[in-house]
Image: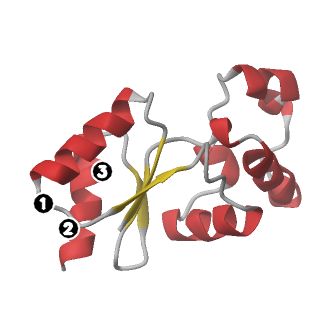
Amino acid sequence: MEIWINPACSKCRSALSLLDAEGADYTVRRYLEEVPSAEEIRLVLDRLGLEPWDITRTQEEEAKELGLKDWPREEAERERWVRALAEHPKLIQRPIITADDGSAVVGRTEEAVREALSRSRD
């Protein structure tokens, strides 16, 4: 199991605390330092079953500067969104947890983190 985090994020810290309390075996990826490639973002999106705009933090200043709110949310624009996330990793929603069964969740709630844990223990 891998968890993409920003250490300054309280949701990330909460997810790590829960994983530690449950004795989970996981790897931490500080995605602002170890920036995911566009291909890695595509793979995580497939695992999440989401589109890039679904995991984009549109309220960030960088998102506003790019005008993301006005970008079309359609298949033809998918690669543009993926590139934006790869070039501006601060825009990626966090934390993202990849489970051992090949799935992934955005672990912003205790329930989502527990879901990832259960998928990794089955």
Residue drawn at point x = 43 percent, y = 64 percent: 104
Query: Which dot, 2 or 1, sits closer to the camera?
Result: 1
Residue 106 % position (x, y): 43, 50
**How far apart are labels 2 and 3 at the CA level?**
10 Å
Question: Could you tell me the amino acid type at mark 1?
Answer: Gly
Residue 4 % position (x, y): 47, 52
**How far apart are labels 1 and 3 at the CA level?**
17 Å
Question: Could you tell me the amino acid type at mark 3?
Answer: Ala
Q: Is residue 7 left or right of 86 when viewed as pictured?
A: left
Q: Which residue is mark 3?
A: 112
Q: Residues within 10 Å of mark 2 (few under 14, many from 20)?
A: few
Where is 24 relative to 83, above or below?
A: below
Where is 60 relative to 29, above or below?
A: above
Where is 64 relative to 36, above or below?
A: above
Earlier sequence position, callout 1 versus callout 3: 1
The quarter in which the C terminus is drawn is: bottom left
Question: Could you tell me the amino acid type at mark 2?
Answer: Ser
What element does badge 2 sit on? Answer: helix
> Which dot marks residue 23?
1
Earlier sequence position, callout 2 versus callout 3: 3
Residue drawn at point x = 11 percent, y = 56 percent: 22
Q: Which residue is mark 2?
A: 118
> Which dot marks residue 56?
none
What element does badge 3 sit on? Answer: helix
Could you say which is closer to the camera, residue 98 or residue 13?
Answer: 13
Image quadrant assignment for residue 49:
bottom right
Q: Residues within 10 Å of mark 3 (few under 14, many from 20)?
A: some
Could you say which is closer to the camera, residue 93 or residue 74?
Answer: 93
Q: Is residue 117 left or right of 38 when viewed as pictured?
A: left
